């Protein structure tokens, strides 16, 4: 009884440490944001000191200017250039007063920013009549618009979408920014534009997810999406399920993409419904709903070593933990192999894993079982070990398939923009707002994965759909198809 109480006390102490760390400590295993901010402040102070030195010593100023010219690189070629010529007033020789002639020039480039500017696109449609036929009036038809009778161009709507879903600016903040330039747009007006655009883009979102499901390997994760519940006067917890594909680490030919689907709950029926028809490898965390999916469908689960590592990391951060520390060292050896083979072909990755990673994994399993027998079964360490051992088959799947990643960090990165948007916007206004969130965020994130400017893409796609409704050519509207097209300016 005494041993059991001591074990329970140790477990409770560990839980308290985790809660304290969650409340007051770091929330990520990488360099925390406050350290970045501290570095920024230090760099600013250093720059201020350099400015003072340069003001007092022209030689130092010239030397540092020379180094900046060498190290600053070149500005992108696609940016427009505004030429400024700084010329002499008197072009006669100061010695003999003869005429000077040009022998060359020095050219320097600086980056300039023009704040966002509003402009008004005026569309005129002349009317024509026949002098002989009084009833005949001919006029070109009005071009189709996303918001009939409204004031925004498709580029304006795209700007609002990108600001909200890529730059995490809620609509009320955007309205405040526009008001500073004398353009008064009510938040409800912006919301109307977003709703119309989301409805228009639903088929593109659906097709994007269909193309992802046609793959033989996907990443999956989910995160909360607080949604306003007007009947109760508070928010309820919805879910945004994220499904991603990224075959670039092994040179796959399919373009990367991410699709989000909103659901009112986190039940296993949601991923089962979403992934109906998918057959292949699904890389996931420890969420039990995916196990139900694997039991019902032809889906193989590959579990995430990053989640296994995180549990031991939390224990090692809380104080002396020799078993957790050694587990971290063994897992780090696996990641060292992955770092060295990233970018190799699938077969090369598989061969390297068989030769180098399999012995590490083979030694790790019995070691974990041995340590599990030495610790209290109620401790957090025992929970961490059981978490790994209960998922061992899925954790070792990456050894036999070079296309499978060691973790699900691809989709974890796709979840981060959702978390930032959730932090700034606090909640979605309704289940419909959650669905809008999923539609636009999917296209924005896929643009980012394919190095496509989401502003240009959304403006172009909205304009094309409004103009022609090209349902039979919807594949041409996907972000990775746009990446291969020349950039088109859309008014």
Image (cartoon, grey):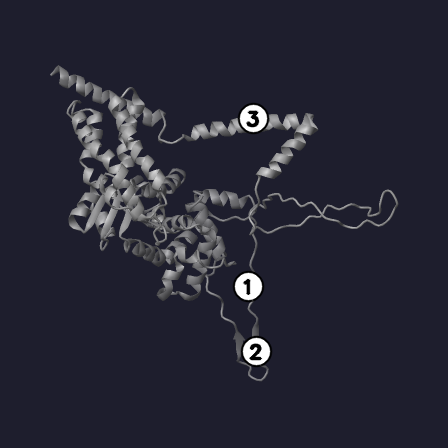
Look at the image and tell me whether residue 112 can be seen: yes
Q: Which residue is mark 2?
A: 129
Which numbered disc, 2 or 1, marks the residue closer to the eye? 1
Please provide percent x and percent y for residue 288: 20, 40
Foreground: 390 or 11?
Answer: 390
Residues at marks 1 and 3, CA–CA distance in whole angstroms: 52 Å
Identify the image quadrant of the N terminus: top left
Q: Is 210 in front, or is 57?
A: 57
Instruction: Tell me which residue sits at (29%, 22%) in the image.
Output: 17
Residue identified by numbered label 1? 123
> How packed is label 1: few (under 14 Cα within 10 Å), some, or many (20 or more)?
few
Q: Closer to the N terminus: mark 2 or mark 1?
A: 1
Q: Quadrant of residue 350?
A: top left
For discs 1 and 3, the disc positioned in front in the rendered view:
3
Quarter-of-image position of residue 202? bottom left
Q: Is residue 397 left or right of residue 434?
A: left
- Which residue is tagged 3? 45
Tell me the crowding category of disc 3: few under 14, some 14 to 19, or many 20 or more residues within 10 angstroms, Cα based: few
Q: Say which quarter of the image contains residue 9.
A: top left
Contact (Cβ within 8 Å) of mark 2 with mark 3: no
Q: Residue at x 33, y 58 (%)?
A: 207
Which is nearer the N-term, disc 2 or disc 3? 3
Would you say the residues marked 1 and 3 are in contact, meaning their CB atoms lie under 8 Å apart? no
* Element on which disc 2 rests: strand
| Secondary element type, mark 3 | helix
């Amino acid at each position: 009884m005494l041993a059991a109480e001591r074990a329970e006390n140790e477990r409770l102490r560990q839980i308290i440490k985790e809660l304290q760390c969650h409340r007051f400590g770091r929330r990520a295993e990488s360099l925390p944001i406050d350290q970045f901010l501290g570095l920024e402040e230090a760099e600013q102070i250093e720059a201020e000191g350099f400015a003072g030195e340069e003001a007092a010593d022209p030689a130092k100023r010239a030397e540092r200017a020379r180094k900046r010219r060498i190290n600053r690189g070149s500005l992108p070629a696609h940016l427009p250039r505004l030429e400024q010529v700084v010329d002499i007033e008197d072009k006669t020789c100061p010695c003999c007063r003869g005429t000077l002639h040009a022998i060359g020039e020095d050219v320097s480039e600086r980056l300039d920013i023009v704040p966002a500017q509003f402009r008004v696109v005026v569309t005129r449609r002349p009317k024509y009549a026949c002098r002989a036929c009084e009833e005949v009036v001919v006029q070109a038809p009005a071009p189709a618009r996303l918001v009939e009778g409204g004031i925004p161009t498709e580029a304006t709507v795209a700007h609002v979408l990108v600001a909200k879903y890529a730059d995490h600016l809620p609509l009320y903040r955007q309205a405040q920014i526009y008001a500073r330039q004398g353009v008064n747009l009510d938040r409800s007006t912006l919301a109307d534009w977003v709703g119309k655009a989301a409805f228009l883009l639903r088929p593109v979102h659906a097709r994007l997810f269909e193309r992802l499901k046609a793959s033989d390997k996907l990443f999956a994760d989910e995160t909360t999406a607080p949604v306003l519940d007007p009947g109760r006067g508070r928010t309820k917890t919805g879910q945004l399920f994220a499904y991603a594909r990224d075959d670039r680490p092994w040179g796959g030919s399919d373009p990367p993409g991410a699709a989000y689907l909103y659901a009112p709950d986190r039940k296993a029926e949601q991923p089962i419904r979403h992934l109906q028809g998918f057959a292949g490898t699904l890389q996931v965390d420890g969420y039990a709903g995916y196990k139900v999916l694997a039991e019902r469908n032809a889906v193989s689960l590959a579990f995430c070593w990053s989640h296994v590592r995180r549990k031991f990391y939390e224990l090692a951060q809380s104080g002396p933990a020799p078993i957790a520390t050694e587990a971290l060292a063994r897992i780090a050896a696996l990641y060292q192999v992955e770092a060295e083979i990233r970018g190799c072909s699938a077969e090369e990755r598989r061969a390297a894993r068989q030769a180098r990673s399999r012995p590490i994994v083979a030694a790790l399993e019995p070691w974990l079982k041995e340590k599990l027998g030495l610790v209290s079964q109620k401790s957090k360490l025992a929970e961490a070990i059981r978490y790994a051992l209960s998922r061992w088959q899925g954790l070792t799947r990456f050894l036999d398939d070079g296309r499978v990643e060691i973790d699900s960090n691809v989709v974890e990165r796709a979840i981060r923009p959702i978390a930032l948007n959730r932090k700034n916007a606090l909640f979605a206004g309704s289940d419909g707002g959650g669905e809008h969130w999923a539609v636009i965020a999917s296209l924005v994130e896929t643009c980012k994965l394919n190095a496509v400017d989401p502003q240009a893409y959304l403006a172009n796609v909205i304009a094309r759909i409004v103009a022609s409704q090209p349902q039979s050519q919807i594949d041409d509207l996907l972000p990775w198809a746009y990446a291969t097209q020349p950039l088109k300016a859309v008014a």
